[in-house]
Amino acid sequence: MESSVYVSEEFHRAGVAKGLYNSLFETLRLQGFYNVYAGTTLPNPPSVGFHQAMGFEPVGTYRNVGYEQGKWHDVKWWNLALQPYTNDPEPPTSIGELEGTSELDDALVAGRVDVSV
């Protein structure tokens, strides 16, 4: 599963991205996923630091992926294992099958952050 979280600058360093990731990862675990991947455009020290702090491990870098504002940018890819691997994994559960369950409700509030605007 590939993840992306974009947070408005006014909410940077307020725990919003961490909260979103926490809820997402709990939901993915509940569904039975084992890995999540994230890409960070380089250079971006805050995003690199954030993914490291969340437990992601670097797995590779795509060179010169995108051209923006007069220069080429690399994308670094990260992996996070969500749960221990098994030899006979079940297929993932659809989000629709989990809808209305207390387990999904718990996963969605796992990353709740109160942010005043």
Image (cartoon, rainbow, N blue to C red):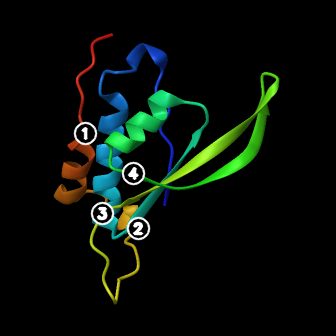
Question: Residue sitting at 28 percent across and 67 percent down?
Answer: 83
- Mark pair 4, 1: CA separation: 17 Å
In this rendering, which labeled residue sits more in front, label 1 or label 2?
1
- Amino acid at pointer 3: Arg
Disc sitting over residue 2 in the figure: none
> Which is more N-terminal, label 2 or label 1?
2
Query: Label 4 crowding class (10 Å Cα cut-off): few <14, some 14-19, many 20+?
Result: some
Q: Mark 1 — residue?
A: 111
Say which label, 4 or 3, has the lower sequence index: 3
Disc 4 marks a residue whose amino acid type is Phe
State if disc 1 and disc 4 touch (CB < 8 Å): no
Q: Which mark is residue 29?
A: 3
The image position of residue 94, as x and y in percent, is: 41, 67
| Residue 56: mark in rendering | 4
Residue 27 at x, y percent in the picture: 31, 56
Count how many numbered circles sit on residues in the image.
Answer: 4
Residue of label 2:
94
- The amino acid type found where label 2 is placed reads Ser
Report the Cα–Cα distance between label 2 and label 3.
12 Å
Instruction: Say which of marks 4 and 3 sits in front.
Output: 4
Label 4, label 2: how far apart the Cα atoms are? 24 Å
| Other residues around mark 2 within 10 Å, as few (<14) / some (14–19) / many (≥20) | few
Q: Name the front one of labels 4 and 2.
A: 4
Secondary structure category for the residue under label 2: loop
Answer with mark 4 or mark 2, whichever residue precedes in sequence: 4
